[in-house]
Image: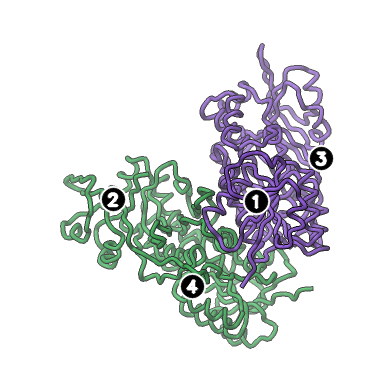
Chain colours: A green, B purple
Amino acid sequence: MKRTLNIGLFGFGTVGRGLYDVLEETQLKEARIKRICVRNINKQRGVEADFTDNPDDIFNDPEINLIVELIDDAEASYTIVKRALERGLPVVTGNKKMLAYHLEELVEIQRRTSAPLLYDASACGSIPVIRNLEEYYDNDLLISVKGILNGSSNFILSKIFNENMSYPDALRLAQELGFAESDPSLDIDGFDSLFKLIIITLHAFGRYVSPERIFVYGISTMNDDDIRFATEKERRIKLVAHVEKLESGNIMMSVIPQLISRDKYIYSVEDEFNGVVIKGKFYYKQFMFGRGAGGYPTGSAVLSDIMACFYNYRYEYKKLNAEVVPEYTDDYTFRIYLRYSSDGDLALFNFLRIREKYESETSKYIVGDVRLADLCRVKEQLRGRNLFLAAYPED
Amino acid sequence: MKRTLNIGLFGFGTVGRGLYDVLEETQLKEARIKRICVRNINKQRGVEADFTDNPDDIFNDPEINLIVELIDDAEASYTIVKRALERGLPVVTGNKKMLAYHLEELVEIQRRTSAPLLYDASACGSIPVIRNLEEYYDNDLLISVKGILNGSSNFILSKIFNENMSYPDALRLAQELGFAESDPSLDIDGFDSLFKLIIITLHAFGRYVSPERIFVYGISTMNDDDIRFATEKERRIKLVAHVEKLESGNIMMSVIPQLISRDKYIYSVEDEFNGVVIKGKFYYKQFMFGRGAGGYPTGSAVLSDIMACFYNYRYEYKKLNAEVVPEYTDDYTFRIYLRYSSDGDLALFNFLRIREKYESETSKYIVGDVRLADLCRVKEQLRGRNLFLAAYPED
């Protein structure tokens, strides 16, 4: 007979509460929440549970044999997860930002202490993408992973494209429904997608690449002209995270809005859903699709990680230990759509080739080819400018 | 350092050849085909490999430490798989018919001899549905698994619905492309889907139900009237396998053509693709989609099973050993569309309620409610009659 998992839970926000409710409803014998550590102990939460605001109350409880970390703050999350692993305690976490920055070290600590760290819930909520990349797509056949990894920006794009909602209204609705992060720029500017891409890349290709190196561009400057352009071309704008093994054997990575045509799987991924396309050498394409945000879907994803802990599952990081691990490269060319207003902004871009150029009294755009390396170089300078950039693949 | 897997391969049809090519292309160090047992040793196959027609040449080779069984004949497959497991040899098989009839016994033999049997390639080709049900959807939250599990009947339906192809032409094309089983009735009459459903149900809900008990009805009697009816209702006919945990806690199962409306995920599953919708209590719906037939996709699925063997993965059949395992029930009511020609045929059906009735000089149909138990009772009598039956959910 296996032991019961006595969970020390950190955080009781949307996901923590979702996990609590899912556990209440399912009445599992394998796991129960023993104590919950929150920042504000005085807040009324309407549940019968043992709350504390002192992490030591969890770490010093000898009965607690699993840490579940579901707080928002990446640095506090890192402290908790590291402390737990160093003590040999298994950890389930949903904090993608923390993972994206510290995964390399956390893998090393796991190796040293043998304490497992599971985080399928951190990428794509209820879609088991990490475990599938780790266990199933575990050979040389994998070519690329590409998808919509952020439910809240996708929700906003859906409302804008399908219901003509304004950007602020759509953002407010996403926040009301509990889809958006407390800092919406994480969703809207692509960083949430980027963090998930870092995690996915480690499990897809065995390479850790730090977030700073990757080109990331979001949807916050998208305007009506951009929407009109997409609609005229019978495309939709989606925020796409992408890692691909190139012919050189190296991998490119990016998070960038894309003009997606109707025949693509992710064209139809709407609202808060996530969709991931896994492309392989022989199986062509596979598509996984499900709820990527919200307390219950993510709570049940956390529960799957908890159950995996119960059965002593751990990521083996096989690809990380492979003989040949691909290097990250920015030697890749995109065809992009660029809407801009000033020549100064345009000068930031080094077009290899210009395919279309349009100017009216109110709007200008260019369709042309740019190198990912050139985009990376001006990444920081693009922020806050009155322009919008989207990959515009030829199909 | 792990040992190399020296494979004794049985069968060199579409999938066996697919596996051979995939292994040749990837040049894995972990696994190689040592010997191939085929029925006809004299057939020219155009590959450099060690062929035999004597199974003993494989079983008596002490270097062979993995059996991969990819033959068509279910009884011969059973003999090989059982013999291997009894000797403690790990086995990878793709034979769904064999599994559907013998899985209960094969689980028992695995328990006794500790030799693992893997068969993710048997259901849905390249989609890792079994492993996900086994590992990820491993708690009480699962409600239903529903999908298009047979690539070749779906290919035929796609050609008929989208390209106005005739049924025989579409079938011939499917066979030419290597999608159809050598006995097409397995595809067309729903048995291939049924076998996969039996395997999926065991891993989804822990219950083995023998194929004879399940209502299965295929597409071979579908005619232009049925296609017209579906098109008028803006639906498509898809052959759907379905297992669902009902409120009673029991599971219903069926394989039946369904009139699928545009807003369903499986509406857009076309050609030889498979699509599976996994529904849970908290995560709502997830959708997995990929190539379900063909030598390369299935060959790469077999390779994933081989690699899983290399890493000592085995199905643990956790749900089969759960305290409460749901019982199979046929206490379930369908709304169906029935096109028929004679009153004698109609008399086979016990409609609880008739919702629509149509008669012209050339065609008659009824839309109404029938119990699954009543359908099961007349299952055999339905074969060969000039009628067509499809579930017609209200949505």
Say if residue A59 shows up in the picture: yes
What's the mark number on residue B50?
1
- Residue A341: image location, x then y, percent: 20, 54
**Both marks 2 and 4 on one chain:** yes
In percent of the image, x 66 and y 37: which residue is there? Answer: B181
Query: Is the residue A56 above or below the residue B254 in the image?
Result: below
Query: Is the residue B229 above or below the residue A124 in the image?
Result: above
In percent of the image, x 16 and y 57: which residue is there? Answer: A343
Which residue type carries mark 1? Answer: Asp
Mark 4 and mark 3: Cα distance apart in space? 50 Å
Circle 4 is placed at which residue position?
A: A99
In percent of the image, x 64 and y 77: which residue is there? Answer: A66
- Residue A350: image location, x then y, percent: 22, 58
Which residue type carries mark 2? Answer: Tyr
Label 4 marks which chain's residue? A
Circle 2 is placed at which residue position?
A: A337
Mark 4 and mark 1: Cα distance apart in space? 48 Å
The image quadrant of residue B178 is top right
Q: Crowding at label 3, few (<14), some or many (≥20) Cα neighbours within 10 Å? A: few
Label 3 marks which chain's residue? B
The image quadrant of residue B305 is bottom right
In percent of the image, x 58 and y 74: which residue is there? Answer: A117
Which residue type carries mark 4? Answer: Leu
**Both marks 4 and 3 on one chain:** no
In the image, B139: left or right of A166? right
Q: Crowding at label 1, few (<14), some or many (≥20) Cα neighbours within 10 Å? A: few
Mark 3 and mark 1: Cα distance apart in space? 39 Å
In the image, A183: left or right of B188? left
Q: Nearer the viewer, residue A95 or B274?
A: B274
What's the mark number on residue B212?
3
- Residue A366: image location, x then y, percent: 23, 49
